[in-house]
Image (spheres, rainbow, N blue to C red):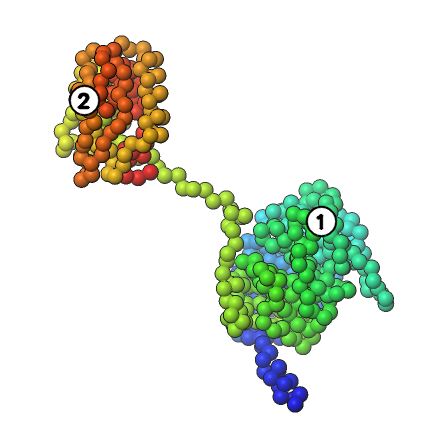
Amino acid sequence: MSAPVVAAQETSRITPCQTFEGHAEWISGVIHLPGGERIMTCSSDGSLRVWNMKSGEQIGDKWQDGENPVRMIALSPDGKTVVSGSRDGAVRLWDIDTGKVIAKWVGHTEGIGSVCWSRNGQRVLSGSYDGTAREWDVEKGETALGPIETGYQLVWAAIYSPDMTMIATAGGDLPLPGFSSEYPIKIWDAKTGELVTTLNGHTMFCLAWTMDRKTLISGSYYSDHSIRTWSTKTWKHIAVLEGHTDHVFSIAISSNGRILASASSDNTVRLWNLETSQPISSHLHHADKVISLSFSADGKQLTTACYDKNAYLWDVSAILKEAGLEDLLLDKRDKSTINVTRRPVQPIKVLNRVPQGFFDGSPVSNRAHRSARDSNDTPSHQRLFQWARDLFSGVPHGRGSAAADVPYAKGKRRNASARERRKPIMTNATASSSRPPNSNTTLQSSGAAQVQSQGAVSTSTAPPVAANTAPSTNPHVIIKHAGRWTRFWLFICCTSSEYTDGHH
């Protein structure tokens, strides 16, 4: 009875869609290269190799600088440079186009266990088996911060927070029979190298930080072999992801922050839904320990590095589709956590029509009575600046005509707030004008006047401004006592949405 069950389990296993063979020793690191068609691996055989993802074939010759095993690689943010850490304690920069070493940084006294780029590409962080972490200035090629004495015998992971304000480290000692000591995760100030806090729990081997900076994720080396998520606000653990039965060597987060992949010495890789902390589908089985893994830029593919000297490519999109969770590939992150979104500023439209009499006593009043043809043929902003030029030119004032109702934009009415904003300005402007009132300008018509604009009827209810005569019932306001400078600037400053062709 057991044979059919085993057969059914075997047939249900997820298989890789590509295998990369060629390294002489176990593969310790893997990354995806720009363009979505190549991957790179590093190995204990001392080489870096580039592979075609579709064919599985190696591209070009292997990259090598000496015989020292290469423990870890990382791609720069601009995709032009790869940093590697080797057992000889050196940190090397490789040109992605030539495959040659362009810089070699020496400072650590033991092998490198971790390398990480800063988000701006100006710094590289390295963690070493000498128990220290160092920050390197990429341009100068020298230590910018450190060495940070972590308190571990071996630093297994050292990573930046996404905003580069903090550094998280994980490490421990060489395992001994009956080993039970625990080494906390340590958080450091990235500017000063001072210890900020410690996260007590099981000894952790690998770390990953979510792009929203809210969560730190760790994989356990000893003890329960769990994966834990930590709040970076309270520094308390949020959830425990259980399932692996041996050391968790590597973890990676998809670019949209919704999927976690974990690699273990239990010969499996597991996918997790970070929103529910639940596993996705069945395990990705390997022939030996899985040392490292990397998501493609779109999160649809995953490459794993195995102790069997091979690397494997997995179709994550197919796995999610089979599990009915293909929506996990969508990016639902709040972009405001990365970029500040600003409301577009709408351009201010210049008035197409100005109430007659507004510029009474100035050359503008003469131009206000141009023919309809001229008014329609000349753009409104050109008319405005012509008025301003005439106003400042010192031409003798013309005499304004009587006030007339002027239509507003289609479908727009003056609102109460607009009236209240204008009323005190107009009154003060009249009182503070240095010019005497123009006695030839009068208020005409009484009661509310209706006018038709573009097929719509609007009624102006703005109260009149008191003059040196009996109160008028004309609903329109004419500033007849203000000087020409005052009238011009009132016209500019009081432009509002009621006058702008139906747009705000």
Q: Position of residue 341 (x, y in %)?
A: 47, 44
Of the two numbered discs 2 and 1 on the same chain, state the one appearing first in sequence. 1
Residue type, label 2:
Ser
Asked if residue 389 can be seen in this view, the reply is no
Pointer 2 and pointer 1: residues touching (CB < 8 Å)?
no
Q: Which mark is residue 310?
A: none
The answer to whether residue 285 is left or right of residue 420 is right
The answer to whether residue 22 is left or right of residue 336 is right
The answer to whether residue 390 is left or right of residue 64 is left
In the image, 195 versus 449, the foreground residue is 449
Name which residue lies at 25% across and 39% down.
411
Name which residue lies at 66% across and 67% down.
263
Q: Quadrant of residue 398?
A: top left
Asked if residue 11 can be seen in this view, the reply is yes
Quadrant showing the N terminus? bottom right
Residue type, label 1:
Ile
Residue designated by label 2: 446
Answer above or below: position of 342 versus 118: above
- Mark 2 nearby-residue class (10 Å; few <14, some 14–19, many ≥20): few
Q: Please name which of the two marks, 2 or 1, marks the residue nearer to the observer.
A: 2
In the image, 265 versus 223, the foreground residue is 223
Residue designated by label 1: 187
Q: Quick one: SS at disc 2?
A: loop
Q: Position of residue 289 (x, y in %)?
A: 70, 72
- Mark 1 nearby-residue class (10 Å; few <14, some 14–19, many ≥20): many
Q: Quick one: SS at disc 1?
A: strand
Name which residue lies at 80% across and 58% down.
182
Quadrant showing the C terminus? top left
Answer above or below: position of 110 versus 61: above
Name which residue lies at 86% across and 66% down.
178
